[in-house]
Every structure is written in structure tokens, then in C-alpha cells.
Image (cartoon, coloured by chain):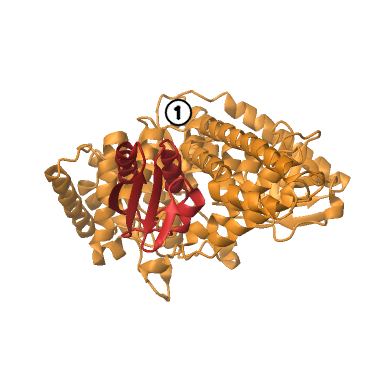
Chain colours: A red, B orange
Amino acid sequence: MKTFEYTITDPLGIHARPAGAIAAKAKEFASEITVAKGDKTADGRRLFALMGLSAKEGDTLIVTCKGEDEDAAADALLALLKANL
Amino acid sequence: MITLRGKPVMEGIAIGILRFLEAEARTVEDAGSVECTPEEMKKRFYEIREAVAAECAGLAERARVEVGQSEAEIFATHRLMVLDGDLEDAVLSGIEAGKSLADAIRQAGEGLAAMLAAMEDDYLRARAADAKDVCARLIAALRGERAGVSRLDVPTVLAAADITPAELLQSDRTQLMGFFTADGATGSHTAILARSLALPSAVAVGSLPDRSLEGETVIVDGFTGEVIVSPDTRTLALYCEKQAAVKAERQLEETFRGLPNCTLDGYEVQVVCNIGRGEEAAAVLQNDGGGVGLFRSEFLYLESPDFPSEETQYRVYRRLLEDMGGRPVVIRTMDVGADKQVGYFGIGREENPALGYRSIRICMDRPEILTTQLRALYRASAFGKLSILVPMIISPSELLWVRTKEQEVRDELRAEGITFDPDVKLGIMIETPAAAVVSDLLAKDADFFSIGTNDLTQYALAMDRQNPRIERFYDPHHPAILRMIATVVENAHREGKKVSVCGELARDTSLTPFFLSAGVDSLSVSPPYVLRLRRAIRECDRSKVKMKDFLKT
């Protein structure tokens, strides 16, 4: 299992476009991917669930990847978060 | 004959058969999908889901080509919503519970929309409409129709409470003449798209005509915002004539595409565009604009729950510069205050907001607002040809203060090893009589001037443009205004600096000979006016212009 934290710098937070980007990226991997904010957890493949986290600028996300390609998935998601959020 | 009054969105006259959009695409009926087993319904769901996802992908591609990247992303997001696992789960459990497929989809959409609508964030709350839109499209596919009106048999004018960009883009544009909506705003995505597609249209007409009038002839006057249902023969004839005149005019304007903005006596000016959103870059290019003469950055502040971050701004500016592909782009720094109020600025009520706490005056108390924006602008400058325009400067000391901040930003970025264009020009708006009168002094430290005629006229004549009681006194051709413009150009040229005119006066072709003879270097207008203005420029001979008549000297 691979876990990392990321703090959002975009003031709009996880709105539709970045949520879409995360979901699309997560679908590229076989690993199970979850994104958590506080006590709320969302399946990384699910757009509505990601938007439902209501994550804003300054919020810290915990991303967990579990599966055969977990290293690659974690790297790709971190890069995506850095570029979009 | 019924006349409705709305706000004009795109100029032109549309005449067609009235059709209500809701009747077809918006209400959901459950016909057809009954008497299937749950297994059949699930299979059917996956089939239409694939079809709608493919349709969204196609729309995204079409939007990318016809309108621009930002519109394309809306449809790309819709595609992901269609394929979303939460939606799938909700539909499947609806089917298990014995609902019809259409019911299951509708309830899934309502559930997701309710989840989004309950959120604190305004932006995400607004996405509830997307969730409903997506489910409406699934249901339309189920009933063998596409959302929007993809097949129209006769020239049609659409009417709806509101119309989405998808519906406009999907409708049959060979037959779609125009549209009007009960709600909506002139700055919406739909309005921007209507302008890109040159669809005569009006929004905010209040209430829609009675449904029984579907099939009647309707006229949309995109110049005034008027909508006339079941016109009498005289009115219809009048508008047919007007429409023919507009069409002839447009065809004539088209012949000026690609030509230089050059007078008969060989004086060349720049014709560029005023825009308020990055998405409008497409309209600039479609109308053959030479670049962006004024990008109002206010929307970033107006549509954000708090001050927009450097990163957010940087992405918007960078994309605009990239979209304009090396053409010059002038971005004006935040001009909040006066008629554009933003809650989180905490400006409070003012006796006289037009003469109050506004733009640079706010930044001088809170310099971080300006430096954040300057950093974003400078970072984006590496991706195109950027100039920065600062509003509401009335004296050289204010300009020097901005220059100090600019220097700080440049030093910071250099220290951080961030690349930027070292030749970015920084100019100021001339929009107060004070700035016009001391323009000789301001020209020493500004790289260029941009004359904002709307505010300049309002301040010089001491008249509020929005006040209908004094409309008859409001004369933008007043010699006081024209003399000030002539003086500003003279003062700028003495210091070797260029002058642009970016207010509404710039598109007034009765003044084009005056601007050209005064020596204005650049005229900035809304995208649909570029070709009309070019025509006026190419028909002008400066040796025949009598400046006396304009200046009343």
C-alpha cells in the first residue's frame, strides 16, 4: 500500500474539472485508489464522490493506492494533483 | 402580436417558427421503457450510457474546434459524469427496486443533484445543474432522441427558461435562427457561445409566451433585445427588410476579412478586441481581430468565493496568451469597485461608488492584491505577447508606486529563477479628466495609454450613463471628450508612446475618421465589430477629414 498527503493550493478546490481529471487518471490503474479528507473518503474513480469531499484551498488530502501498480499510480496522481490543484 | 423585452446578447434579426425547448428535451416521460425485465433494463442502460458518453466526447471535440478549450472541458466533464460509478450504482439499485429505467435514471440524477446542491460551495452547488443535464441526456437517448434539437424541419427560434451551451451546440444550426430565454444573463456561457456562433438572441425576457403559441412566427431583435410573437404583416415586413439589410451588411463586411486596417492615404492602425473571459479568445480569432486590446480580469474576482490565487490567475492568463498564438494581449488589472462590487473585498456601502473606493485605490491599501496579480501576469508573460494595463491612475505618484511594485515582482521572480518576458509593457487607462489633463506627465512613466471612453465621458460630462432621465443629455461626441482624446494622443506621441481607444466609442464608425486623424494607434472593440470597423478605416481618407468639425475649434 502506498499513501501520500497533498495540500490543495487552488482556491476553488476539487471542483468538476480537477475531479474529472483525478477520476480519469485513477481509471488508468488496476490499483484501488481512495482520496480522503478528514473523515470523508471517496473512491478515486468516482467524480461525484470526489466533488462531494468539498475539498478547498488549504485542505489536506490523503491519497491511498493499493494494488499491483500502486507505485506508478501514486506517482501519477501526485503529479496530477501538483499540476491541477 | 405580443412583444417581450429582454437583454440583447448578439446583434442581428432572427425570424422563425417558435418552438419551446422544454417540451422536447427537458421533461421526462416514462413511455416505452416498461415491460422489460431488470436484466434487459440494465443491458439497455449500459448501451445508452456508451452512446451518450460517445456523444459527449464528440461534443467536446466539436466545441474544441468551433469554440475553444474551456467549452470543450465542460463536455469532457459531462462524459465522466455519465460514466460515473455513483450514478451507475444509483441507477442499478433503482432498477432492482422495481422502477422503470427512465425513473431510475431520473431519481439517480436528482439524488446526485441534491447531494451537490446541499454543499457549502457555490461552485459545486452550480454543478447540480450538470448532474441533471447529464441524466436528461441519458433519458433522451433512451427515448431515441438526442438532447437539444438536432433535427429541425423549418427555420426555428427556440424559447426556454434557460438554454445550456450543449443544447445550442447540438441543435441543427442550418435551421436554428436564434433563441430567447426567460432567465439567463448576458455574461453566461450560453451568451458567449451565441456570440461565437453569431446567433441573434435575447436573454432575461421575464416570462415566456403561452405554450399554445408554439408554431407561430416569432422575431428576435438582437439589437434591442425585443421578441415579437405573432407579428402583424406590417411588423413582419419591416423586420424582413431589416434582416435583409443586416445580411447584406455582413456579406460586405466579410469581404474585409484578412485585409490590413489601412486608410486610403496609407495610415495603418491596429484593430483588437475587448473581452471579459478567456473563452472569448475564439470569438476574437473568428472575427479576425488582431489580438486582445482589453481583457477585463474582473470575472476572476467576481466569480470566486475569495481572492483568486496566483496559480488560478496564472493559468487563465497563460491559456489566453497561448490561445492568441503570439498576437498582442493587453490584460487590465483588477477594476473592482464602482458598479462591480465583490462581497469579500468588504468595501461596504458608499454614498458615491463611481467616485469611491475602486481598483488601484484598493490596491494601495492592500498591495498584496496587486502583487499577486502582477506575479501571475509576469509568469504567464513567457507564453505570448503580454502588456499590462492599470486602471484609475490619476497622478504620476500612483503610477510610480505601481512601477515600484512591478520592479519588486520582477526581482522576486528573477531570484526564484522563474522565466518571464523582460519586455512586458505596462500602460495605464486614461479614464478620468484628471489623467487626460496631466497625460503629458503620465506619458513619461507609462509605456502606453488606453483611453476608456465610457468612464471618461461619464466623469467629464458629470452624467451617469445608467440614469435614463438624463439619457437625452448624454453626448459622447461632446467636443470636451474629443478634445481630451486629441490632447492625450499628442502628449503620448511626444514621449514616443502609443495610444489605444478601448471604450464603446471605438466602434462608433462616425468617429473613425476623427480617431485616425488624431493619430490613435489602436482601436479595441467587441469581436463582432472588427470587420465593420476595418471597413470604415479602409474607406477613410485622412486628408479629407475636417478636425474642426469634430473639435468645434
Q: Tell me the residue that label 1 is attached to.
A: B261
Task: Please state which of residues B225 and B38 is positioned toward the viewer in this rendering.
Answer: B38
Q: Residues within 10 Å of mark 1 (few under 14, many from 20)?
A: many
Task: Please state which of residues A66 and B344 is positioned toward the viewer in this rendering.
Answer: A66
Element on which disc 1 rests: loop
Q: Is residue A17 visible?
A: yes
**As displayed, is residue A38 above or below residue B44?**
below
Is B172 placed left or right of B545 in the picture? right
| Residue B510 place in picture, x, y as percent | 54, 41
Q: Is residue B547 visible?
A: no
The amino acid marked with disc number 1 is Asn
Is B367 placed left or right of B501 in the picture? left
Is B313 placed left or right of B245 in the picture? left
Task: Classify residue B239 by image quadrant.
Answer: top right
Name of the residue lying farthest toward the left: B415
Q: Tell me which chain the residue with mark 1 is part of.
A: B
| Residue B196 place in picture, x, y as percent | 56, 38
